[in-house]
Amino acid sequence: MKAESLSRAFAELSTPLIADAALRLKIPLRIAPPGIRPVTTNQCLAGPALPVRHFGSVDVFLEAMESAQTGEVLVIDNGGRLDEGCIGDLTALEAESCGLVGIIVWGAHRDTPELRQIRLPIFSYGMCPSGPQRLDPRDSLALRSANFGNFVVETSDVVFADDDGCLFAGAERAEEILRVAHEIWQRERHQAQAIKSGRSLREQLEFARYLKKRATDPSYTFREHLRKISGAIEE
């Protein structure tokens, strides 16, 4: 799936919808650790991952951008460190100028006011005024993959991110995930409109019927009930 199509399809969706779609399709999903949030709220991004490992010097980011494709997302492994801001306004401007649609950092950033003015979607643990004061040995995977929490992000992955967090999935299933996410979005919008019009969610989901059935069969689950009525929540 092309980067532009991926971004366009995600524009009216959200990471919760992507997560629900992956669950329904039984597709493994990697969720960024809690605390990874956008520098500026109300931003979202989706695109192929451009992973890179940081060892204390900005040159690794610039090298990654040498071969970057328009629409990619720079995914930075900085080991989850909070004692240094590994990217700032210059890296963000360079990323924007070469067509990247955002940056996701397993670590911290700096130059927060400038980043907010640039408006390129950037996600991290937060800010730290100090830049790196180290230069660690670089390994052979620096431009091939990025650790992110307890999983690895590779060039074969796609990224989805918004105010609720960041998700990673294999690119080969992205189109399928987006299709089902859109179906869920449509159904839930209909349910929301029905609630506003006076038809409660309990009524729509025949909740009284579920309680009655569960009273006679304690093993009967709400998810089983939703499957029978084709509900969109949880199933």
Image (cartoon, grey):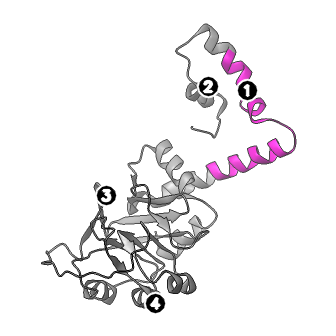
- Taking the image as shown, residue 215 lies to the left or right of residue 124, namely right
Q: Main secondary structure of the magenta part?
A: helix
Residue situated in front as seen by the camera: 32 or 4: 32
Name the residue: 27% across, 81% down. 132
How many C-alpha atoms fall within 10 Å of the one at disc 4: few (<14), some, or many (≥20)? some
Q: Quick check: marks 2 and 4 in contact, CB under 8 Å?
A: no
Q: CA distance from mark 3 to mark 4?
A: 26 Å
Q: CA distance from mark 1 to mark 3?
A: 41 Å
Name the residue: 27% across, 66% down. 79
Q: CA distance from mark 2 to mark 4?
A: 51 Å
Q: Which residue is mark 4?
A: 93
Magenta stretch: includes residue 198: yes
- Taking the image as shown, residue 37 lies to the left or right of residue 140, namely right
Q: Secondary structure at mark 3?
A: loop
How many C-alpha atoms fall within 10 Å of the one at disc 2: few (<14), some, or many (≥20)? many
Name the residue: 57% across, 38% down. 234
Q: Secondary structure at mark 2?
A: helix
Magenta stretch: includes residue 79: no
Q: Quick check: marks 1 and 2 in contact, CB under 8 Å?
A: yes
